[in-house]
Image (cartoon, rainbow, N blue to C red):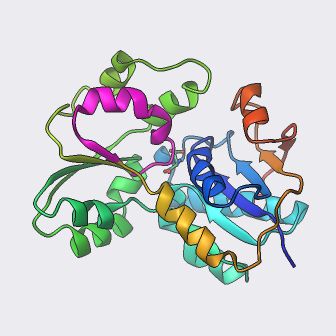
Amino acid sequence: MRRPLLIVDSGSGGFTVLDAIRERLPGLSYSYAADYAGCPYGERSPEEIMRRTMALVNAAQSRRQHGMIVIACNTASTQILPQLRDVYSIPVVGVVPAIKPACERYPMGTLLLLATPQTVQGDYLDDLVARFSQGVRLDRYGSTDLVRLAEASLHVAPTLKDVARVLSSVPAKSYDAVILGCTHFPLLKVPLKLFFGDAELIDSAQGIASRVFTLDEDRLSFNAENAFYVTQRSGPPSSFFVRYALPDPDLVELNL
Ligand code: DGL
């Protein structure tokens, strides 16, 4: 039985992953679930992130059945995947910072991981760095102000000055590549490019899209209705609804 894809994030960051997935699977049907009431997750405790993400997935699953789940949030993915895989028998795909591909591309390079505070300091990240970053200099910078700026960017285009204010303690033009370890950050690609100069910006979206494509095996449905679940009526402007063929959001209460 083919069913829609469920894509989950604390807010609008998951749309950057959805873009890549829709490119690989045109006409895909999906539900987008966003915890705008809890965003940003990057300053919350691991327990809170776990509880909120679980509750959001459960709320979406109780409204309609899905063929696959993508946790399009690095902060949540690094905490919650094993628990979700225990509960649901459908594939659950997580998004984690593209440390491995970035280190393979720049084996002697100077790299920066830009993510949320929870992601940069977590055990999962330490393990990823220990496994793949030999020979590489990898700095880490965690910011939730950048997440807020990314949400605001859906309404007003951010400038280089806005980004430079948030990243005032980051040396701008000293990296070969910058790993965008938060799905919100590709929303700021234009000003981030200006800030980081020649550095390549690397995110995980294409990798996730390939994973979903490979796992599909007739699980996912196409050309059916999409759904939009939110925990608070804030978020994207109406142009987004048109672009992603989303209906009016369905306000869900989390069972925390
Ligand atoms: N988009 C999320 C991530 O990839 C979380 C941002 C946040 O809510 O702090 O980490």
Where residue 38 sits in the image (x, y, percent)?
Answer: 64, 43
Magenta stretch: residue 113 in it? Answer: no
User: Looking at the image, which is closer to me, 250 or 109?
Assistant: 109
Task: Say whether residue 194 is magenta.
Answer: yes
Q: Quadrant of residue 173?
A: top left
Tell me where residue 139 appears, x and y as whole percent. 20, 50
- The residue that appears at 81% across and 42% down in the rendered structure is 246
Which corner quadrant holds the N terminus? bottom right
Q: Residue at x 51, y 49 (%)?
A: 44
- Please determine whether, in this image, residue 22 is positioned above or below residue 146: below
Q: Is residue 80 visible?
A: no
Circle count = 0
Question: 187 or 42, which is in the foreground?
Answer: 187
63 left or right of 11?
A: right
Image check: 63 left or right of 77? Answer: right
In the rendered image, residue 228, in percent from the top left (x then y), is placed at 80, 46
Left or right of 188? Residue 60 is right
Q: Which residues are magenta?
A: 181-201
Residue 229 % position (x, y): 80, 48
Image quadrant in which the C terminus is located: bottom right
- The residue positioned 23% from the left and 67% from the top of the image is 104
On screen, residue 19 above or below 206: above
Q: Is residue 150 above or below residue 82?
A: above
